[in-house]
Image (cartoon, rainbow, N blue to C red):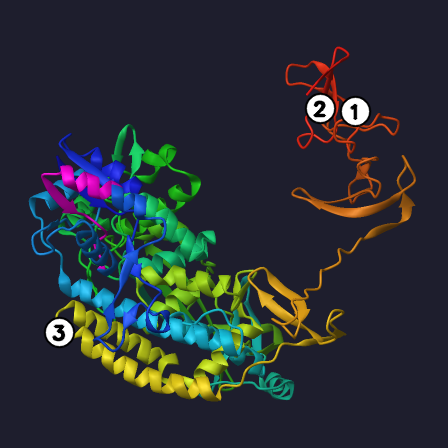
């Protein structure tokens, strides 16, 4: 038996269908080991012994390890086939260590798409575990543990913030900085002048752009009025320019651009895009055959394989014509690009979205279509437009109007449906030196607008552009900031909370170096150097710790502890002031003398009574209640009276299955709390039973009591 170990159970089932029966494919379900939380400061890292890490089996993974060990003991050969990135390499190394496999000899499979061709090719060309990649991941993990644990402990004890980290805190700072710039923004007034010009039956709409050859800027209404009074009654066409404009296709998707586009088009959060893309990568059952539909979705490279490019050229020629074949090569380029994988693309260009739509969920279909069309269009020819610009002159003032027409749609044939629709303006036939009279002039007041709030898609772009984190960290970073209540998502905009702003202020005050985008980006480059074998991880750890711990010690001794907010009442048990405290369930009021006094104030439920109306059945008050379906008003005497009505005043009829308890119903002799009422079984039979079911199962049947 030959054993292949992958990360995902779904991936294992897909791969198993490509291979002969002699192969068994099992999943580790992600990492099986992680740093311990023991030792000095609970770091799981021996700082005094060359930062030696202590690893333990991850929570919930003991059964997985047991299963894998049994399989390894029966296997003739073991292949490690975790994801083709730094994290995946580390998982393979941890598997080898836990399963007692020789790290220098155990075969490591690398593939970037889950197709039969790719899997068989990787089996024919195995390699061994890349220890440089492992060292890079381990260095990153240790630095993140040292910084994360220490900063989180500091902030929890001083200002009650939940966590901090090398990547998440810098991202939070960028969002807080944007919020400050929005609050500090002061709008500036400016004016524009629009004119309507006529010559016989021809009309032009144009905007004032210059005076005596210089761009014009109108700062107030007085200036606008002075200009209007200086304008002549007629203008001459002084210039007509026709220029060609080329619009090149966008490159295929990388992780960040896919997350941005999916957010913009479908409002998918980065984490949702990652989840859906993972399913497409791991494989779907298409007409009885399992196959991965896209290549590996964590990448920062726009490269495409020669085989894929060749198949796309044939497809484009067949479907659209040879004139639609465009650029067939991309250079990854750019800073902070690892270029370890191809771009995100379909594994097979013949699997068009419409052909496999019935096998996909709505979300999967939308994302697959987007990836398919982006990759295909990236290899198509440019769009060609003809732009016409017309200048009307008079008294040294120039008005401008323009129009454009598409001469060749190029890649828009495929990707145009995702692009913003362009307003097409058509100009009449015009000649230079023609005179147009002014039919109307309008002045318009404007104010400059503040910067926009960041969305989740924009934050991903920000991280990618600044080299903060790697493709695999974009979505988890945003999720952490939201779950830890440093940010709020308000109608798509990410707004820092007061706790988020306080956290950034304190970290910038005491750890300015580590809150810099440049430091975070430089660290990613250093980790890449370790992965390439050009840097020593231990030296990087020593340099980091020496600089960090000195700042930490100063911060711990000098950062002021934020006192809890008093609510203006005293504890009924000990007389100490009551304060607002935080928990994972939200804020609550408790005694400031904790732990000596553990008084917690229970929140009274507010009853909202419907004014001016009583229950039509029993005369009781109608109070507002809430359910999964929304709000409604119900009788305060429920369950004796089960009258309900909607917020529109219409009665909500009680479901037939709901038991109505008459006032004169006898009390249950068994529990003494419920009442004996008529019920209907699933077979339609009537019987008498306790209304306190399932707590009490007393039943009356044919005058015999059966318990």
What percent of the width, then of the height, locates residue 528?
Answer: 20, 70
Judge depth for marks 1 and 2 and give the one in front: 2
What percent of the width, then of the height, locates residue 701?
Answer: 73, 14
**Label 1 crowd (10 A; few <14 / some 14-19 / many >=20):** many
Return the residue nearer the eye: 653 or 196: 653
SS under mark 2: loop
Which of the two labelled residues, at mark 1 and mark 3, occupies the earlier sequence position? Answer: 3
What percent of the width, then of the height, locates residue 454?
Answer: 48, 68
Judge depth for marks 1 and 3 and give the one in front: 1
Query: Which of the labelled discs sits on residue 676, or is there none?
Result: 1
**Label 2 crowd (10 A; few <14 / some 14-19 / many >=20):** many
Is residue 72 highlighted in magenta? yes
Asked whether the beta carbons under mark 1 and mark 3 sit within 8 Å of each other, the answer is no
Q: What distance separates the C-alpha of mark 3 from that of mark 2? A: 77 Å
Return the residue nearer the eye: 235 or 472: 472
Instruction: Examine the rendered structure and indicate whether residue 64 appears above or below residue 298.
Output: above
Is residue 350 highlighted in magenta? no
Q: Which residue is mark 3?
A: 534
Dividing the picture into quadrants, the one containing residue 291 is: top left
Residue at image x 78%, y 45%?
647
Q: What distance separates the C-alpha of mark 1 from that of mark 3? A: 81 Å
Which of the two labelled residues, at mark 1 and mark 2, occupies the earlier sequence position? Answer: 1
Q: Which residue is mark 2?
A: 698
Q: Specify whether 457 is left or right of 408.
A: right
């Amino acid at each position: 038996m030959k054993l292949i170990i992958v990360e995902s159970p779904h991936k294992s089932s897909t791969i198993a269908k490509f291979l002969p029966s002699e192969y068994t494919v099992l999943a580790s379900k992600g990492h099986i080991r992680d740093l311990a939380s023991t030792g000095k400061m609970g770091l799981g890292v021996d700082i005094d012994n060359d930062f030696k890490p202590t690893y333990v089996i991850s929570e919930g993974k003991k059964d997985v390890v047991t299963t894998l060990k049994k399989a390894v003991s029966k296997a003739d050969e073991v292949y490690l086939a975790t994801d083709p990135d730094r994290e995946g390499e580390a998982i393979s190394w941890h598997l080898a260590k836990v399963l007692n496999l020789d790290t220098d000899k155990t075969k490591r499979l690398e593939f970037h798409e889950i197709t039969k061709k790719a899997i068989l090719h990787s089996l024919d060309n195995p390699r061994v575990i890349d220890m440089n990649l492992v060292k890079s991941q381990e260095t990153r993990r240790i630095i993140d543990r040292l910084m994360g644990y220490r900063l989180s402990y500091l902030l929890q004890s001083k200002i009650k913030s939940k966590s901090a980290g090398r990547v998440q805190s810098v991202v939070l700072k960028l969002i807080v900085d944007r919020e400050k710039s929005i609050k500090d923004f002061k709008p500036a007034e400016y004016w524009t002048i629009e004119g309507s010009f006529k010559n016989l039956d021809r009309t032009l709409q144009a905007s004032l752009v210059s005076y005596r050859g210089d761009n014009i800027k109108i700062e107030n209404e007085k200036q606008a009025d002075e200009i209007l009074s200086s304008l002549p009654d007629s203008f001459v066409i002084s210039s007509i320019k026709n220029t060609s404009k080329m619009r090149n296709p966008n490159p295929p998707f990388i992780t960040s651009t896919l997350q941005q586009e999916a957010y913009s088009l479908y409002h998918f959060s980065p984490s949702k895009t990652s989840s859906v893309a993972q399913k497409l990568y791991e494989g779907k059952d298409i007409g009885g055959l399992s196959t991965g539909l896209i290549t590996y979705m964590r990448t920062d490279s726009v490269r495409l394989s020669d085989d894929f490019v060749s198949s796309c050229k044939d497809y484009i020629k067949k479907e659209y014509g040879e004139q639609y074949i465009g650029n067939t090569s991309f250079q990854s380029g750019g800073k902070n690009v690892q270029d370890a994988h191809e771009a995100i693309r379909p594994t097979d260009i013949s699997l068009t979205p419409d052909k496999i739509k019935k096998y996909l969920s709505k979300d999967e279909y939308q994302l697959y279509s987007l990836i398919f069309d982006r990759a295909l269009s990236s290899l198509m020819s440019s769009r060609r437009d003809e732009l016409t610009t017309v200048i009307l002159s008079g008294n040294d003032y120039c008005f401008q109007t323009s129009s454009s027409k598409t001469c060749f749609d190029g890649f828009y044939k495929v990707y145009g449906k995702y692009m913003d629709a362009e307003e097409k303006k058509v100009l009449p036939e015009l000649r230079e030196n023609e005179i147009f009279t002014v039919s109307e002039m309008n002045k318009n007041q404007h104010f400059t607008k503040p910067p926009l709030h960041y969305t989740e898609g924009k934050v991903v772009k920000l991280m990618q552009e600044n080299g903060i984190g790697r493709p695999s960290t974009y979505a988890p970073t945003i999720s952490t900031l939201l779950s830890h209540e440093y940010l709020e998502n308000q109608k798509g905009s990410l707004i820092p909370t007061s706790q988020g702003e306080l956290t950034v202020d304190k970290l910038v005050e005491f750890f300015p170096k580590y809150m810099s985008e440049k430091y975070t980006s430089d660290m990613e480059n250093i980790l890449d150097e370790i992965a390439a074998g050009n840097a020593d991880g231990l030296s990087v750890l020593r340099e980091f710790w020496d600089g960090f711990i000195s700042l930490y010690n100063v911060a711990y001794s000098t950062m002021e502890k934020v006192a809890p907010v008093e609510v203006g009442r005293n504890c009924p048990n000990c007389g100490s002031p009551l304060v607002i405290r935080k928990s994972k369930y939200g804020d609550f009021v408790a005694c400031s003398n904790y732990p000596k006094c553990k008084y917690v104030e229970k929140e009274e439920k507010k009853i909202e009574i419907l004014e001016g109306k009583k229950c039509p059945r029993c005369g009781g008050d109608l109070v507002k209640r809430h359910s999964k379906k929304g709000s409604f008003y119900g009788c305060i005497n429920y369950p004796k009276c089960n009258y309900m009505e909607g917020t529109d005043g219409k009665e909500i009829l009680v479901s037939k299955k709901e038991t109505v308890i008459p006032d004169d119903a006898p009390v249950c002799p068994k529990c003494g709390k419920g009442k004996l009422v008529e019920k209907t079984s699933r077979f339609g039979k009537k019987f008498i039973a306790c209304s306190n079911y399932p707590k009490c199962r007393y039943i009356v049947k044919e005058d015999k009591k059966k318990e």
